[in-house]
Amino acid sequence: MKADLKIKKKPMKEKLNKNELHRQSVLLVFTIIFVIYGFIFYYLPLAGWIMGFQNYKIRDGLFHSQFVGFDKFIFLFQDKSFLRVIRNTLAMGIINLVATFVTAIAFAILLNEVRNKTGKKMVQTISYLPHFLSWIIVTGIIHDALSNTGIINEILMNLHVIDGPINFFAHEKYFWPIVAFANVWKETGWNAIIYLAAITSIDPSLYEAAEMDGAGRWAKIKHITLPGIRPTIMILLVMNVGNVLNAGFEVQYLLGNGLVRKVSETIDIYVLNWGVSQSDYSLGTAAGIFKSVVAIILIIIANSVAKKSGEEHLF
Amino acid sequence: MNDKNEMELNYANADGESDGGIQIEPKVNPPENKRKIEIKRSHRKRRASDKVFTVCNTVFMILFSVVTLYPVLNTLAISLNDGLDAVRGGIHLIPRVFSLKSYQTVLGIQGFVRGAFITVSRTVLGTLFALVANALLAYIISRKRFLFRSELSLFWVITMYVSGGLIPTMVLYKALHLTNSFWVYVIPGMVSAFNVMVLRTYMEGLPDELEESAQLDGAGYMTIFVRVISPLCKPVYATVALFVAVYQWNSWFDAMIYNRMKPEYTTLQYELMKLLNSVMQQSGSATGGAAANGGNVSAVTPVSVRSAATIITMLPIVCLYPFLQRYFVTGLTIGGVKG
Amino acid sequence: MKFKKFLALTMACMLSVAALAGCGGGDKPTTGGSSEPKGLEAGETYEKDEIVNYTMFIAMPGSEINDGNEIQNIIAEKTGVKVKETWLTGQSAAEAVGSILASGDLPDFIDGGDGMMQLYDAGVLVPWDEYIEKYPNIKELYSDEEWESFRQKDGHIYWANVFCNTYGESMATGHNDEAFWIQCRVLEWAGYPEIKTLDQYFDLLERYAAANPTMEDGTPVIPYTMLCEDWRYFCIENAPEFLAGYPNDGSVIVDTNAMKIVDYNTIPEAKEYFSILNEEYNKGIIDTEFATQTYDEYIAKLSTGRVLGMCDQWWDFAYTVNDIFVQQNLDDIGCNYVPLGLTLEEGKEQMWHVYGDTLNNSSGVAVTTSCADPDRAFRFLNDVLDQEIHDLRFWGVEGVDYLVDEDGMYYRTQEMRDKWADSAYQAEHRCVYSYLPQWLGTSHDGKNAMQPQEQASEFFAGLADPLVKCFEAYGAHGYPDMIGSVVKETGPWYPMYSYSNSMTTETPGGVAWTKMGEVKHEWLPKVVMASNFDKEWDAYMKAYSECKPEDFIAEMQEELDRRAGR
């Protein structure tokens, strides 16, 4: 394929000779600064993880609180509902990841195909606006639209798809799709910004050449745009895989109710119910440690898969 | 259209109307006239399908815009509606009882100007600092010959998924004398691994030849960063700047936690948050009860204040966006050098 | 961050439930009955440079007032102290207190709400003991016995609750608590019948809805709805304790004869209550969306006047809804709600309304060790109880915010009332110091109310005609009379919810309590919506008993024994 774009991966084969090492000393100096900075602001506070193994009390502080070993973790994993909560979190995390990923990429690519410059700018400006709305506003609108007298039920009834209104929030099966839709609705335009920026790095002459060769729109998307943003896609995918356990709190909290509790509760909500609202810092910390460990394992797996298949990877 | 044969044929017909430029021999060799028809047909097909694509894409974009614009317009309508009346619901795109009371309330809070000043300062300084730090770190990690590339990468990737929690962080900042100070808004969040990775990916996509030729000219790493790489990274710099700026602009929690007793370092969002909280409190407690005694009070409600605050928060970003937008809507030509 | 915001709201609201519930008022004997102002020397004023600036953090959401607030300045001139209040925003009380402690930047005054014990544990509070004796207004707040209940394990008193404390005779006209509410037009339509039982209540709603199925504009009425959202699910959850004739201990019933804790979720009254709800739901009387509606949707529904009745606490709906009724002229057609004190069988005594004060000794205002001059701080706490300052806080400036008639009675014009409620005016003019010590009940002058909402003239001034007619028809002088609860002292253990709210997962009882909540959130709507009630109820009871409610009950029993002094 003539128009196919290949990002050069060929490393410079020069040896790390003395001269190069000397050149790198400036990088090394900055590296040390960045490592010190990172250590202070990100790694030092992890001393707080000790709380996960303590029965932490403010009055005793980190140093004098009673150690309870893995009690808090045992408490979590003995609870049947915690396992269900992990399932919910994972399911929603994955559904949201896939849905928001696909829509953002598709939107960025399609927007890039818009020829009318004013239209393009306008659509883009509009697209990221919902990002600035708080969840309480967005879920409020969704609640409105899906209520018995809301627009969705009205349309479905006018189309004779259903006879009476569906109470969407009363059925477990609708909950995950509603949450996914809410995420897509709010964040598609915003998430697309990164891809739009990545698209700009594609050499326009590639498009010109393809045009010369008579490539159609789809062909150009498939053979130029997509490969061009592939590294960005891969990096974001790998990073976000680590976030699947952060499926969120607010959406589920605001859209959920007692009837769908079995599918709506996420780890964060669980921690709220059990830990934070009862000022049990240790339980919250334990859940946090669990999430971090899972995230790091997932990241390492995703990264090595990416590495093996020759894709862009994180480290 | 995704059929491979057709694709190749399309490429073959690059020259459009003039039918001479066929460079690839078709796999089957049909009689001359039949071949011509085929070419024309596929040609027409391509143009037609491009047209269909354009129409579909336009329709899709319009639909998409309508759907995403709706919540924003709805918020705007509610913010321009009388607060109490809005509680009844059923407002869509047009205010039912027009009122500017919500905006008066939001703009009338005492901390507004002070908060706005701090917010603008932290947004400008924070974005600047973060951009330089993130770009530099990304540059280091993206140097393919750098000795500790992978280790440094991993060191920062991990920071995305771990957190020590509120109280240890608080104790740390206190020890560093960052509490009760403006710099708590700028220093701690300066490097974000996510942004670094986005920048790095972009930098790695730049052709190696750039660096090589600069190096032959005797440029050191920092010169290459400033003179060669950075000018090419404008789109991704704009993206990261936008992310950081929006984060800074919307932040309020740090203002409350670290500068609780220092009203001079309050931020706009924290002031709005406090207002919202107080309105919520009033609409559900004895302190706001006078209106319940049958007064003719046009009260503000949490819903109306939240909407007005949202619109006010959104406005500057909507105004600034077009200036950033040109960096990532139009394509960029990498001057002269091709990968 | 967002997570914390939500959490804080939940917590804050939960706390205000605790703070407001049971604040009905009533007459509580006060230790001193003297009407002499104490502590504040008449005519004494302070110059600007003599005024001490204090800070105060209140672990509750609230309204900040402007710097240069007018009444705050007047109070500062008279007392020599100005307090800058900072409120809870986007955190839970416990979290906020935790981070304040970690930061080491303590305010001079603090009300830690749920985080009070953390402050005590951290040893940053100044004991009140000597100052209680020194300052008479402070001492007068509580009887010796009540002060004792604030005493902590180390033998000192570190805080005092400021709410629900009646001076002299109670002037209460409102019912802030839970009740089955009904629109007064429904009562008027039926000729103001006596409604005493849940059956009569639903029977009336059914008949009214059958005769008047729509509003004037054609939208159908909703005879009954209930809120199940999050912590507000008390609207469906705790009616059984009242229906069984007990007061709002919140999480349990206290059987005063046997001094035993009773679980109201499993008593026969609970089953009967839910079976009635189930029956009504299947008849179409109960809103089909009740289980999934949000609070905003619930309030929106109520605001249209379509909802004829519901079970709720007054503060949860009345402020917003009543204002909208006025705005929409729905108050003139009798959409306002009046409370009914229902039971399951006729003639049973009930305690929906509790007369008398409810003392919540788990939190209150405290002075911290960061305060340079604690004596000055306590003198200020004493001064704010002075009648002159108290009037400034709650009534405002005479001639500006209220007038005095020839009998010495305070009153407001409608214009003053509107102004007083305006948020901008509040910020620049009003200074309530709402979390500093205060009184309800009768003023030292023996005529006026300490706080305007209890002044009879103020209360009746704005009532719509249908409401006045309704009160007249039943011979009621206020909301409590509509309920007609039996006048009965609550024990020193009341309310028990102050204990269950503080339980943690460290004890089996706390674990059970959280699980019970989860199960009820899920099952109560299911039970109401069931097509086969008995089957669903049994399934609910099975799930419920798996939470080990007995662990919870046992711990509550222990606490009851402790509180009852046994």
Image (cartoon, grey):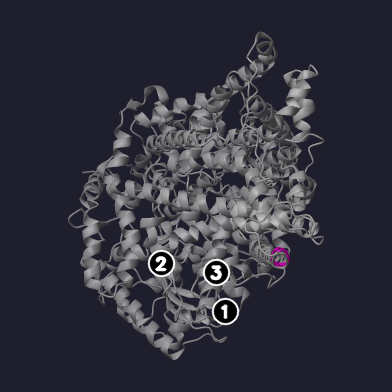
Quadrant assignment, res C45: top right
Q: Nearer the viewer, residue B161 or C339?
A: B161
**Which quadrant does the N terminus of chain C fall into?**
top right
Q: Chain of mark 1?
A: C
Residue denoted by label 3: A145
Q: Decide whether residue A210 is among the magenta residues.
A: no
Residue appearing at x 50%, y 71% in the figure: A147
Q: CA distance from mark 2 to mark 1?
A: 32 Å
Magenta highlight on residue B40 = yes
- Name the residue type under label 1: Leu
Real-space CA distance between mark 3 and mark 2, rounded to the nearest whole angstrom? 15 Å
Answer whether labels 3 and 2 touch (C-beta < 8 Å). no
Read off the residue under disc 2.
A170
Mark 3 on the same chain as mark 2: yes
- Which residue type does callout 2 highlight? Ala
**Residue under numbered circle 1:** C330
CA gap between label 1 and label 3 equals 27 Å
- Image: magenta residue range: B36-46
